[in-house]
Image (cartoon, grey):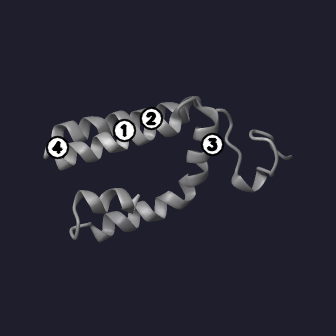
Amino acid sequence: MRRVLEPAAPGRANAVLCSLIDGMSGPTTWARIWRGLTQERAVERTREQRLAILDAIAARRPEVARSWSLIHVAGVEEWLRRAPLTPHPARLRAGPVGRLSG
């Protein structure tokens, strides 16, 4: 996620915010992978929304950036509420997508 913050404010990245995001990104990686496997167009939609946020920041349109951020976060929250049971990564095994062990 730091890669998203730094282009928005080169040389001015907030070290505390970056550290917080880095700390959260590891544990949420498996959830993002699971969303990509269980929700149609999740990866494309995420990329589109993040680019829209960056474009709004670059255009100095903070309200538009906030709006896209809200849309992005709300979409993830809604998926989390409705997501199929999400296994811990250690319980996933190699093989066909979606097959789980024990």
How many badges with numbers are in the image? 4
| Residue type at tag 3 | Trp
Location of the N terminus (image quadrant): bottom left
Residue identifier under label 1: 49
| Residue type at tag 4 | Pro
**Is tag 3's residue or tag 2's residue first in the polypeptide sequence?**
3
Residue identifier under label 2: 45
Instruction: Work out whether residue 57 or residue 19 is closer to the camera in this orientation and state it.
Output: 57
Asked whether the residues under the numbered discs 2 and 1 touch, taking CB atoms below 8 Å apart as contact, a structural biologist would say yes
Residue identifier under label 4: 62
Residue at disc 4, secondary structure: helix
- Residue 34 numbered tag: 3
Q: Name the side, left or right, on which 70 lies relative to 44.
A: left
Instruction: Work out whether residue 96 or residue 91 is closer to the camera in this orientation and state it.
Output: 96
- Rounded to the nearest angstrom, the CA distance separating label 2 from label 1 is 6 Å
| Residue type at tag 1 | Gln
